[in-house]
Image (cartoon, grey):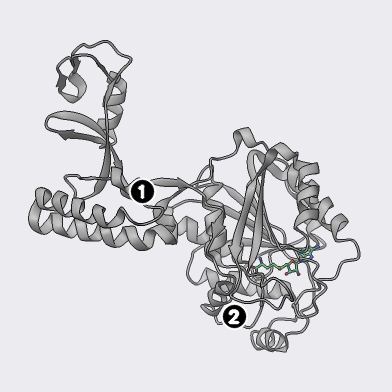
Amino acid sequence: MNKLYIMDAEKCLNKLPEKYFQTVYIDPPYNTQSKKFEYHDDYADWDVFIASKIRKTHKVLQETGVLFVSIDDNKLIELRLICNEIFGKDNFLGMFITRQATRSNAKHINTIHEYVVAYAKNKKKAPAFEIKRLDIPFYAEKLLPLMAEIKKAHKQNGVVFANNLLKKRLKDFEKLEHFSFLKNYSVVDENGEICFATDLSTPNGKPSELHIEEIMLHLPALKTRGWSSKEKFIQLFNENKLLFKQGRPYEKHLLSESKDNAMSILNFYSRQGKHDLAKWGMENTLSTAKPVELIKYLIKISQISPHDKILDFFAGSGTTAQAVLECNKEDGGQREFVLCQIDEPIQNNSKAVDYLKQNGCSNQISEITNLRLKRLQHVFSFDYQKIIEPEMIFQAA
Ligand SMILES: C[S@@+](CC[C@H](N)C(=O)[O-])C[C@H]1O[C@@H](n2cnc3c(N)ncnc32)[C@H](O)[C@@H]1O
């Protein structure tokens, strides 16, 4: 069940089951001492504040689980040291640089980025951080039009024409940085899909013919190589991944399913978080909301299954809930979110307070979280429990 805890993160973490979450994403107050945010951001002992929560996070992560923490230059070093101590240096997975803005007010270096630090509960068991290229905007922008053009050409003029057109288009891609992988995707299949075909002979096996009655396939012996196993052929046949070129069998890898490792520089601009809130009429509520796409990306690279449990105990406007719901909508998954937001009154943003008042809400940040969840319910069908101290549980309408 999805949950929204309205209480201090520490108390919430104490109530959560151990080894339960696959992904924990947090965007804590960065302790900038700035007075311009809706939440207070001046902690006498930020390191202690964050360390005790990260220690508890380690307990609620399952063995394959991953922690992501958004942070800026101000507290990066302290955060890394704290995480090294609690998770172990060896479980540091890496760090993303996320583009933040085009200008900053800093005196010397015009800092236009933040970070997302990633730690595994156990690096050996953590997911490989692979993501479908089509889920990375940088690739999708170029690959989707190519795939559509080839599919159309295949439908209108047949497979030979489509294959020739693909060869021409691949020439154009040769010069583009980051697209060298594409040269392998040189075949158009019988459905007009672009794919990469890998040979199914092996240098290990002895040359001998292969007869597979189940799928009515007979392959004569090769001169020096053997064939892959019978089971492999049957499996590929069942998955519709067998492709024949001049009578010879190949394994088909679709471009639409091609994956890449996560890259360390991400182009999700922070201001997008505000635009995402604007879709719900809530653009003036929380100025530091993160982009939904950033959190979707983190959920996807750290995924073990489409039923993963995802926690964010500095929920703010509830961006993580929207990211979870959008991932579910895209692949029919049943991921669940647990959010926690302390009952802290909104500061420095009278527009937010007025807006909440107009919507019958009080001036707490948790009201922003709850309002977004209610708006989300109009689009995504889901339930959530609201748990308010001391232990009052409401089934949100
Ligand atoms: C940077 S904001 C998070 C913004 C969020 N990522 C979003 O996209 O809207 C940090 C949030 O943590 C909340 N917070 C601060 N201390 C907390 C605590 N001890 N327990 C729970 N939430 C807390 C603040 O009220 C604030 O809403």
Q: Is residue 231 left or right of residue 376?
A: left
Instruction: Report the residue that reaches farthest toward the left.
Output: 157
Residue type highlighted by circle 1: Ser
Does residue 253 lie above or below 314 as drawn? above
Upstream in sequence: badge 1 or badge 2: 1
CA neighbours of label 1 inside 10 A, class few (<14), some (14 to 19), many (20+):
few
- Res. 11 in view: no
Q: Is residue 106 visible?
A: yes
Q: Is residue 65 above or below residue 269?
A: above
| Residue 20 picture location, percent across and down | 66, 43
**Residue receiving disc 2:** 282
Quadrant assignment for ligand 1: bottom right
Q: Which residue is rendered at x = 15% and y = 23% of the image?
A: 216
Dot 1: what SS? Answer: helix
Q: Secondary structure at mark 2?
A: loop
Residue 6 position by quadrant: bottom right
Q: Position of residue 164 (x, y in %)?
A: 14, 51
Which is nearer the eye, 95 or 212? 95
- The picture quadrant where one finds residue 140 is bottom left
Residue 180 is tagged as 1
Q: Nearer the viewer, mark 1 or mark 2?
A: 1
| x 8%, y 56%: residue | 157
Specify the quadrant of the image occupied by residue 313: bottom right
Disc 1/disc 2 C-alpha distance (Å) = 42 Å
Mark 1 in CB contact with mark 2 (< 8 angstroms): no
Q: Amino acid at mark 2?
A: Met
- Residue 13 in picture, x, y percent from top left: 77, 52
